[in-house]
Image (cartoon, helix red, strand yellow):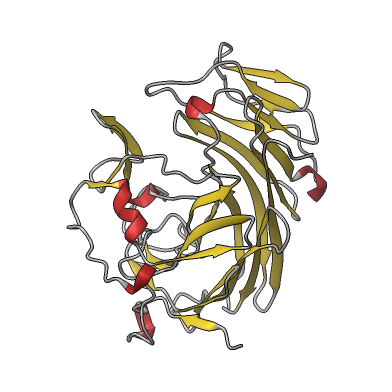
Amino acid sequence: MRKKIITAGLILGCTGAAIGTVYAQGNAPFVPPPANSTSPASLLDDMPSKTISNGIISAKVYVPNKFGFYRATRFDHAGMITHLTYKGHDYGRYWFVKTSPNVRNFTYDQDGLVAHSNNIAAGPVEEFGENGFEGASRGGRFLKIGVGILERDNDIYDRFHTYPILNEGRRTTRATANSIRFTQDVSGDLSGYGYSHTKTVTMVPGKSQMTIVVRLKNTGSKPIDTTVYNHHFTTLSPGNEAIELTAPFKLTNVRPMPSDVIKFEGPRMTYLRAITGQEQVASDLTGFGASASDNDFRITNTKTGFGVRLRADLPVARLLWWSVPSTLSLEPYMEIKLQPGEEKRWTHTLDYYGPGDN
């Protein structure tokens, strides 16, 4: 049977015109809110998406689109994931109640957490580092994989700032019942940067497992020297109560973490209580070595038994933990270095488990 082809709307930059049609959940038209408005997070459920499932786990995966879930310049536009569900537990609930272009990063109002439009991500979702920002003058071009070629319009690179997108290249999307593949090709750009980026999200048949396979090829004339990580935005318990992170090495925090909240013991980091209100717990973590076998972590709610094993097949270059009462995220950074013509492939494997699982 021929696979259904979904085209991700208008192609911006030098390619000019639209190809094909826009895929929308239920084929219903989406009307975006005004650009400067504060909007409820629930509106994001209506963005163009595809639900994939293997009958054990399912997830809502968003497609890149002119009016898509994510249109800023921090995260990869393709493949934001929400409502990943296993045994009735939703691992991907929204961590914000509203979105707004008028705050930096996030803030709080009387209703709860308000996230800036550049950070309204759901995960897992990849963020690549910038390439060529320092070498570009104001008005010049630099590279952000997963987004495209951007214009430098400020003095210091700021991941929370939304840069003008000059060239998004050509995007295509293919979906089956249990998988979805996104391709972005950026070529012929004046900056000398170019790449082909393919990401395939699959619910593995017969398992409570999701894989994200990425292939990146440098098709430009300049080297690519960057990092990438998955920002997981995992929902396991209110306030992250009873959360335990386990690593294959002894965990150590770099920045101070509140002793009444966090306890370190060998390879484990444990929450002693739930965090509330506007509390935030974050630090770089160390102890990992140069082997890819160290890129293997478990995050578990020890009260309910629900959890997830996160692993990838490249070594960890930096490890960051971040949490607010509505979500937690482990961020294992990996180095990506590609000379012109070179390509690299890596795989994220996520195993979900819950009560009654061995």
Q: Is residue 180 above or below residue 225?
A: below
* Res 67 quadrant in image: bottom left
Which quarter of the image is occupied by the N terminus?
Answer: bottom right
In x, y percent, where is residue 351? 70, 49
Against 139, residue 263 (above or below) is above
Q: Quadrant of residue 300?
A: top right
How far across and down, in percent of the image, does residue 13 sit? 35, 78
Image x and y of residue 347, in percent: 70, 60
- Is 280 situated above or below 16? above
Q: Residue at x 65, y 38 (%)?
A: 307
Write the residue at 69% across / 73% down. 343
121 in relation to 147, above or below: above
Q: Please state which of residues 154 and 200 is positioned toward the viewer in this rendering.
A: 200
Residues 25 and 41: in front is: 25
Compared across the picture, whether 95 is left or right of 182 comes to left
Relative depth, front residue between 302 and 192: 302
Quadrant position of the C terminus in the picture: top right
The answer, for residue 201, to whether it is visible in the render is yes
Total marks drawn?
Answer: 0
Name the side, left or right, on which 306 lies relative to 238.
Answer: right
What residue is drawn where x is 35% and y is 64%? 68
Residue 156 in sight in this render: no
The image shows residue 231 at horizontal and vertical percentages of 54, 47
Depth order, front residue of 3/95: 3
